[in-house]
Image: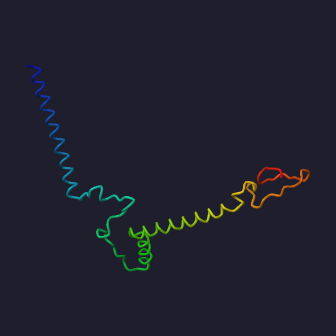
Amino acid sequence: MNTMNKNWILLCAFLLLAGISNGQSSKKNKKKDKSEKVTPRFEQQGNSYAPFSPEETKKVVAPTKSKKSKKKKSDYDKFNITMEQKVEEFKDRMEANAKANRKKARQMDKPQYSDPSYFGHKRKPKIRKVKNRKYCKECGITH
């Protein structure tokens, strides 16, 4: 009988504590709901393909009229570019890189880079007689 009373007391104490903690957590949630509405996480974050929200949901803030507003507007326009403009910039960069790579390939066709007898020299080194040979600082070979 003694153990049964202890079990009932422990059960009642546990239920009482659970009810108190549940009531406190619901008060916090009510305050949060009234003060601000939380948007889902996937709407807040962008990704590499669409880093910002779609154009129709963007709110454009008109700058105030002052001397500084013109400067701020240009800064705003610099960073507020659409996805189409970003794609165009990407294509331009890729074309410029392809052009630079073609130029490097043309340079590598020169004998300075393709002929092994140049030893890294810009012009082919002179092959002197044995008694007149000198040590080359550029390639470390006596020629």
**Extreme right residue here?**
131
Q: Quadrant of the N terminus?
A: top left
Quarter where residue 20 is shown: top left
Q: Residue at x 12, y 24 (%)?
A: 6
Question: Does residue 63 sit above or below 32 in this rendering?
Answer: below
Relative horizontal placement of residue 62, taking residue 113 as reference (left or right): left
**Extreme top residue here?**
1
Question: Does residue 33 sit above or below 15 in this rendering?
Answer: below
Image spot of residue 87 (x, y percent): 42, 67
Q: Residue at x 83, y 50 (%)?
A: 142
Image spot of residue 85 (x, y percent): 42, 70
Quarter where residue 112 is shown: bottom right
Taking depth in this image into account, of 89 and 117 the one nearest to the observer is: 117
Image spot of residue 109 (x, y percent): 66, 61
Quarter where residue 107 is shown: bottom right
Relative horizontal placement of residue 92, taking residue 36 as reference (left or right): right
Number of residue marks: 0
Image spot of residue 120 (x, y percent): 73, 55
Q: Residue at x 14, y 35 (%)?
A: 15
